[in-house]
Amino acid sequence: MCPLLKNNVTNPVLGSSAVRSPTTQEAPPPISEPWQVVRVSDGDTIAVKNSSGVEKKIRFCGIDAPEKSQPLGQDSRRNLQALVDEAKKQVMITSIETDTYGRTVGEVFTAVQGREKFLNEEQLTSGMGYYYAQYASKCPNHSALEKAEAIAKSGRKGVWSGNYQRPWDYRKEQRSGRNRS
């Protein structure tokens, strides 16, 4: 069962529908919708398109992957690309909010041979990102993300295999370097 599912809502990825509210006759709006991945930008951002041709950028809720120019940044992007390719580029997205850059922040799921994967969690379990505690509280599955990071940390996987700079510290350093010029 999908860890996202709460309040009598069934699995959004495997095609089940939401349970109707007992007080109304109308079904609630879908908690997620299907999208085709058109590009994996980095380890925590994808570009997607729906069946109507609408495109948008999705920033994974609750995680922060190394920047492409950081050590493991390309590894993180490749890991996410492999997860997306495994699902034939089909994802389900639960939108949480829009960030300051206009990207949709969300939880991203795939289904491969009837088995659901929560890609935000997969990236953390493999050590290809960090739990972004500062922003994770808005993610419905933040506790799964926190546990996924602990698994990677205990196994010294990816970002936990050495003393790597956190992406948020790297970005801050890059911004302050530009401001000095």
Image: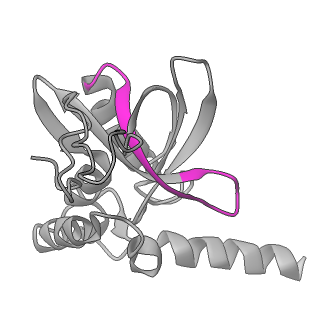
| Residue 149 in view | yes
Magenta highlight on residue 89 = yes
Q: Which residues are magenta?
A: 87-104
Q: Residue at x 21, y 43 (%)?
A: 19
Left or right, 156 with reference to 173: left
Left or right, 3 with reference to 108: left
Total numbered labels: 0
* Image coordinates for residue 61, horizontal then vertical, percent: 43, 60
Left or right, 62 with reference to 115: right
Check the picture and name the quadrant holding the C terminus: bottom right
Left or right, 90 with reference to 54: left
Which color scheme does this rendered protein use?
A: one colour
Q: Up-down: is 46 above or below 134? A: above
Quarter of the figure with residue 110:
top left
Q: Residue at x 37, y 23 (%)?
A: 89
* Image coordinates for residue 8, horizontal then vertical, percent: 17, 52
Q: Up-down: is 48 above or below 28? A: above
| Residue 81 in view | no
* Image coordinates for residue 21, horizontal then vertical, percent: 27, 50
Magenta highlight on residue 139 = no
Quarter of the figure with residue 145:
bottom left
* Image coordinates for residue 13, horizontal then vertical, percent: 25, 34
